[in-house]
Structures are given as structure tokens and as C-alpha cells.
Amino acid sequence: MDAAQLKAICLSFPGSFEDFPFGPETSVFKVRAAVAGGARHEAKMFAASAMNPDDLSVSLKCEPALAEQLRAAHPDITGAWHMNKTHWNGVRLDGDLPDAMVRDMVEDSYDLVVASLSRKQQEQLGWARLSGSSGSSGGPR
């Protein structure tokens, strides 16, 4: 997977956008619901990458138990640099991970972040939580 493919995946989700809060060298992908009732909701990060073609990696949010399993099974997945390693994985994209697996991890990260938003914000994003579920597979795809 290359930087353009990663960017396209990250921007394919409802409410997602690219931001540069750490400077022009780091793409941060965030999600925000539409402005409602005059109040602007804060955006939440679900992915970050330096987009360096020589050393392409992305930081993605992950459920802690799954993060440990993925790190144990794949050498290209580690605790994310400069992030809470309990909740964030660093994923090298120039290795052996299949593109479909990376896409699934980006989607899981997005879903985890959207699950933390209010129900109204989730509805604005077209994201419906499955009844009885705590979150992560409720998004439309």
C-alpha cells in the first residue's frame, strides 16, 4: 500500500477529513459530525501518518486485547510511537501485510472513534450501532 492509497481509504469514511495539527509533514485523519444546533463538535483522530514513501506507516486506534494479538502475530504491527500503546498500533505499510487487512484496521480505528461520539453525532454520520453491541462494527460499508 502506498501513501495515496492510505489517504484514499482514510478519507472514504463519512465525516472524515485530513488535518495537519503537528505540521505539514504529518497527516492526521479525523472524524467530525456535521455542525448541529450551532455547536461545533470537536473532531477526533482515528489515523496519523508521516506519509513518508521510504518508511510508510500509520498509527491506528485498536481495542487493547486485539492490539496485543496483532502485535504478537505480525512483526509489522507494534505499539504506535508517541501514542498510548495500549490503544494505538503502529502499522508498517511497506512490509508483508495485505492491503485488505490494513483497510480493515483503518475501518476498525474509525469505528472505535465514532463509537465514542454521541448517538446524535453517530446518526449524523450515518453510523448505527448494532443493538446490544458496544460499538465497532456498526458503521455502514
Image (cartoon, rainbow, N blue to C red):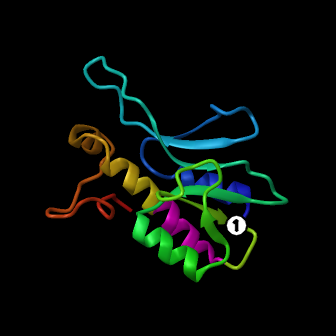
Q: Where the C terminus falls, by quadrant? A: bottom left
Three-letter code, disc 1: Leu
Q: Is residue 102 magenta?
A: yes
Q: Residue at x 41, y 30 (%)?
A: 42
- Residue pointed to by mark 1: 93
Residue 8 occupies which quadrant of the picture?
A: bottom right
Task: Give the percent coordinates (x, y) of residue 84.
Answer: 52, 51
Q: Residue furthest left?
A: 132
Q: Nearer the viewer, residue 76 or 99?
A: 76
Task: Give the percent coordinates (x, y) of residue 10.
Answer: 55, 52
Q: How many marks?
A: 1
On screen, residue 1 above or below 28: below
Q: Residue at x 63, y 52 (%)?
A: 7
> Of helix, strand and loop, which one carries label 1?
loop
Q: Is residue 129 left or right of residue 71?
A: left
Residue 72 occupies which quadrant of the picture?
A: bottom right
Q: Which residues make up the magenta segment? A: 97-107
Q: Residue at x 25, y 20 (%)?
A: 37
Q: Residue at x 32, y 46 (%)?
A: 116
Q: Is residue 68 left or right of residue 136?
A: right
